[in-house]
Image (cartoon, helix red, strand yellow):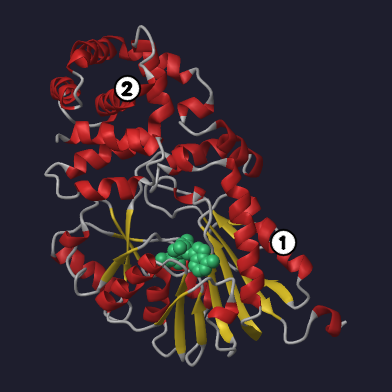
Amino acid sequence: MSPRAAAARVLAQLAGPGGAIGDLLAPHRELREFGLLREICHGVCRHRDALDFLLGKLLERPLRKRDQDLRYLLLGALHQLRELAVPEHAVVNETVRAAGELGKDWAKPLANAVLRNFQRRRDELELALAGESAAVRFSHPQWLVEAIGADWPRHCQPILEQNNVRPPLCLRVNRRKADREQGMRRLREAGVECDPGQLAPSAIYLPKPRPVGEIPGFAEGWFSVQDEASQLVPGLLAAAPGERVLDACAAPGGKTCHLLETEPGLASCLALERDAGRSAMIQDNLARLGLDADLAVADAADPPAWWDGEPFGRILLDAPCSATGVIRRHPDIKLLLRPADLAAHAATQARLLRALWRCLKPGGHLLYTTCSLLRRENEQITGRFLAETDDAETLPIAADWGIECAQGRQLLPNGPVGPDGFYFCLLSKALRGKAAAR
Ligand code: SAM
């Protein structure tokens, strides 16, 4: 099947009960033009409402419900005409052909007319689009525009814009193999352009993204792919030699591995993950990087199921969340996330935080992080926890990055060379409870 027809099918499934785009794309990985397929799928997710607006102006009457595949084929073609360096005649011809592949020969003249019409009326249509609401122009559900606007009124439009850019490729250099200078030298000697990150000492950006198989040293464990925001974690958790560390929501293991690369002398590191399939990914990453951790598949909110009763000196809770800070990497979030999901995430986050606190030793630190932009998953969770927990206090994060919150710090997504949206709050367990200390 051609990449255009395959993209139409994947996108129609995604809009139904299909699941995340990564899972839907996985069976197509061997396709010769997989890159184009993925670009069309991601592009349509990024700009779906804007593309639907344009398509609506080009159709004499709306498409039938059962023609969702055709709708997505045409949205994909409009995306190619607007943003990709594919010759326009090829976009039109291949889209018409793909309509046949979808078993819709009757739609070939329609596809041809819609796309040629767009070529003729492009300026007028783009002008009309510019007058539409932020939700349509930036293709975000209205409720999400409102939620981001309520939490970040001054930053709302830049966030919506940043959510629609192609994310940078950021590598983490494995400190056990090389320092950043050596890592960058190795890349440059192989002709790979690279720049140091500005926030995390291990971060290296590749301005021209490439598959990991083509990154020199990747297979030998010199590098991992990890956003720069996530690479700030070991510096904040500051685990010392001899410390017992728990990474409570660990898969696929990016932060577990980074913690181990940064401090080889830990007494132990337990990587806990509820999902067995995802836990296997932690093992794969540890093996590639030549690292070792204890793995357990269990619900972190149920310590009796996995905890030996020996307290940890450092705990990382990288909590499951709405992932609204990483929409640029996973644009399907805009199609899949529902308002009710936020309440469910907040309940899980609060439950995890309360349960894990019991496993932290007095004087120990717990770092709460999410890749969410929304205060109800971030400072409202940590704020309520602090109010109800006698022996918890926040430690200031002295940093020149991000925005200081009531407690913790927030990074907003910032491209083309910059971090994802991420929240950090460092909590310390008092040696005596606040009440006892008074
Ligand atoms: N820290 C990871 C990394 O850097 O690679 C990313 C973690 S991801 C944000 C959250 C993970 O928590 C998911 O893999 C999810 O399956 C897991 N998870 C969700 N609820 C959990 C629970 N109750 N107990 C343990 N793991 C959980």
Report the Cα–Cα distance between label 2 and label 1.
Answer: 48 Å
Disc 2 and disc 1 in contact, CB within 8 angstroms: no
Q: Nearer the viewer, residue 73 or 229?
A: 73
Q: Nearer the viewer, residue 317 or 163?
A: 317
- Residue 46 picture location, percent across and down: 39, 36
Which residue lies at the image location 22% right of the left edge and 39% below the top edge?
37
Residue 436, quarter of picture: bottom right
Is 99 situated left or right of 181 in this image? left
Which residue lies at the image location 61% right of the left edge and 79% below the top edge?
365
Q: Is residue 412 above or below residue 387?
A: above
- Residue 346 picture location, percent across and down: 63, 55
- Residue 172 picture location, percent across and down: 33, 67
Which residue lies at the image location 67% right of the left edge and 70% below the top edge?
354
Q: Is residue 401 above or below residue 438?
A: above
Say which amino acid is labelled 1: Gly
Front: mark 2 or 1? 2
User: Which residue is label 2 attached to?
Assistant: 67
Say which amino acid is labelled 2: Asp
Residue 408, quarter of picture: bottom right
- Residue 375 picture location, percent across and down: 64, 51
Kindly give the residue lying farthest to the right in the view shown. 438
Sequence-earlier tag: 2 or 1: 2
Q: Quadrant of the C terminus?
A: bottom right
Q: Nearer the viewer, residue 405 or 119?
A: 119
Dot 2 alpha-carbon crowd within 10 angstroms: few under 14, some 14 to 19, many 20 or more? some
Residue 63: assigned label: none
Residue 383: assigned label: 1
Q: How many marks?
A: 2
